[in-house]
Image (cartoon, rainbow, N blue to C red):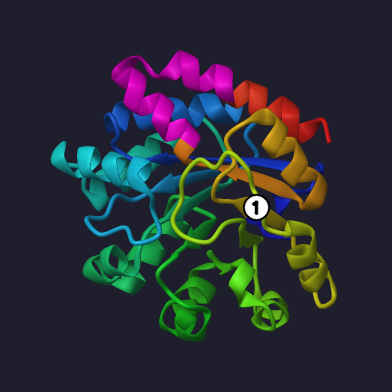
Amino acid sequence: MTKTKEAFAKGKAFIPFITAGDPSLAVTEELAVKMAAAGADLIEIGIPFSDPVAEGPVIQAADERSLAAGTTTDGIFEMVRRVREKTNVPLAFMTYVNPIYSYGSDRFVKRCAELCVDALIVPDMPFEEKGELQPYCTKYGVDLISLIAPTSKERIRMIAREAEGFLYCVSSLGVTGVRTAITTDVGEMVSLVREVSDIPCAIGFGIATPRQAEDMARKADGAIVGSAIMKIIAQYGTDCVPPVMEYTAEMVRAVHGV
């Protein structure tokens, strides 16, 4: 079992997302360590990018603040090195193809492996093009996470057969962001996956409240929350750690209670 899959071994997984470098790399480091202590099962760390096509306004703004503060990929790797001195919680990078190519694909994935970053999520790389990164991920033992969406339909089974780590199930059409209601039939997506694979399914895009997280955890194996956390960070800036920890603890209770 890979480290990524281990995040789901005890039942339902709560997976928070934070943008590296917003409001600073020091705060990102503190958030990651304390989220792990609060019970997060896997932490997604976003590498900021100037054109994050899958992101809504909240995470776009976080990317812009991070880049304006001078965040670099090497700076993020160094921050992860410090995180790894304090916790062995499973970690995943969420980033786009361009920053990986710019850094050098082999060099990037090798560095991930050296720092025990367990998985990569690349939302602008279609399943059919994953061959551009898969060889490096296989070489260094990093899970390349596949995404499925409500529109994937007949492709869901095909993607699920080859998926590794966990399957990122996009609950809503469009970009990331808080939703007042999640209307997608998540259960149907998960049942199509289950026809061909027992890989864990985590639901992301739109989850903001403990009730939504609890509902999604009933239908799948985990809940991913990003924009709701980044809204708290945007509101409190460098003072964001206590309110984010309070929110994280609440969401962990909701998901783990299912």
- Position of 191 relative to 241 (above/below): below
Question: Looking at the rendering, in which quadrant would you find the N terminus?
Answer: bottom right
Q: Nearer the viewer, residue 111 or 247?
A: 247
The vertical placement of 101 against 2, above or below, is: below
Q: Which residues are magenta?
A: 228-247
Q: Residue 257, how many percent across, how many down?
A: 82, 30
Q: Is residue 247 visible?
A: yes
Residue 207: quadrant of the picture: top right
Q: Quadrant of the C terminus?
A: top right
- Residue, x 69% and y 83% (percent of image)? 154
What's the residue at 63%, 43% (across, down)? 181
Q: Which residue position holds label 1?
A: 203
- Residue at horizontal 38 percent and vertical 53 percent from the top: 55
Q: Is residue 85 visible?
A: no
Q: Position of residue 111 (x, y in %)?
A: 37, 59
Residue type, mark 1 in image = Ile
Q: Main secondary structure of the magenta part?
A: helix
> Which one is in front, 102 or 249?
249
In the shown orientation, is residue 75 left or right of residue 160?
Answer: left
**Depth check: 147 or 173 in front?**
173
The image quarter in which residue 253 lies: top right
Q: Is residue 216 above or below residue 155?
A: above
**Residue 229 counted in the magenta span:** yes
Local crowd size for mark 1, using a 10 Å CA cut-off: few (<14), some (14–19), many (≥20): many
> 239 or 231: which is nearer to us?
231
Residue 215, percent across and down?
Answer: 76, 41
Whether the magenta-drawn stretch holds residue 157 is answered as no
Q: Describe residue 246's horizontal placement relative to residue 195 as left or right.
A: left
| Residue sitting at x 73%, y 58% | 186
User: In the picture shown, does residue 251 fall above or below 176?
Assistant: above
SS class, disc 1: strand
Q: In the image, residue 67 lies at what x, y percent?
A: 19, 44
